[in-house]
Amino acid sequence: MTAFADVSSAQAQVACHEGTLFIRKHDTGETLRFMVAVVDTVQTRAQGLMFVPQMPDMAGMLFVYDAPESPSFWMRNTLIPLDMLFAAPDGEITRIHENAIPHDETAIPGGPNVQYVLEINGGAAEALGLTAGDHMIHPSIAGSCN
């Protein structure tokens, strides 16, 4: 994954591409750009970021579910700390779990009505000022690229 940071105004047009995810901050209207890998099958979601030794800044993995559910994550065989951003079917971030501990097998619940989960480097959500209420924009999220 290639990493680069891009912050633009709310008026900026976002070009939807499979490898790019934007987060529009609800309080400032800023749009942040992440390079992502998409995992949308049972097998790829189960593997996730296991055994990945590092991840570039402004990069992540987007977990896509066929329908809303109440997912639960753990950090088995995950080598790096992660922030997990849980989002509703419309892309609204409903919960953020910060700094999940590598190798910890404690369940991390996403809450109800979650269809998307973005994993990014641990500490990035706080550093970037991401909060519940922000919106993910990606081709996998219906209506978000309009």
Image (cartoon, rainbow, N blue to C red):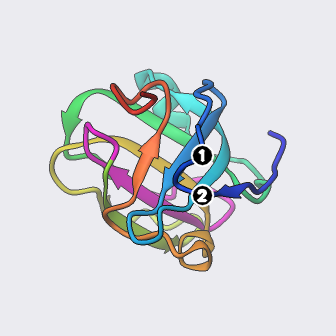
Relative placement, left or right, of 58 versus 68 is right
Image quadrant occupied by the N terminus = top right
Task: Mark yes or no: residue 69 visible.
Answer: yes
Q: In which image quadrant can residue 47 be found?
A: top right
Name the outermost residue toward the front: 11
Task: Give x and y (percent) for residue 125.
Answer: 54, 70
Question: How much space separates mark 2 and mark 1, taking CA atoms?
Answer: 6 Å
Q: Amino acid at mark 2?
A: Ser
Task: Give x and y (percent) for residue 142.
Answer: 33, 25
Q: Nearer the viewer, residue 34 or 62?
A: 34
Identify the residue at horizontal 50%, vertical 33% (top origin).
138
Task: Give x and y (percent) for residue 121.
Answer: 65, 63
In the picture of the structure, the residue carrying the numbered disc 1 is 12
In the picture of the structure, the residue carrying the numbered disc 2 is 9
Task: Give x and y (percent) for residue 14.
Answer: 59, 37
Identify the residue at horizontal 47%, vertical 73% (top origin).
98
Q: Amino acid at mark 1?
A: Ala
Q: Which mark is residue 88?
A: none
Identify the residue at horizontal 76%, vertical 57% (top origin).
5
- Residue 6 sits above or below residue 13 on the image: below
Packing grade of label 1 (10 A; few <14, some 14-19, many >=20) is: few
- Residue 77 sits above or below residue 104 on the image: above
Q: Secondary structure at mark 2?
A: loop
Q: Which residues are magenta?
A: 74-91
Identify the residue at horizontal 54%, vertical 78% (top origin).
126
Tag 2 near tag 1, CB within 8 Å:
yes
Q: Main secondary structure of the magenta part?
A: loop
Please check the rendered image and state whether residue 69 is part of the magenta-colored stretch, yes or no.
Answer: no
- Residue 37 sits above or below residue 140 on the image: below
Task: Mark yes or no: residue 73 visible.
Answer: no
Please check the rendered image and state whether residue 79 is part of the magenta-colored stretch, yes or no.
Answer: yes
Image quadrant occupied by the C terminus = top left
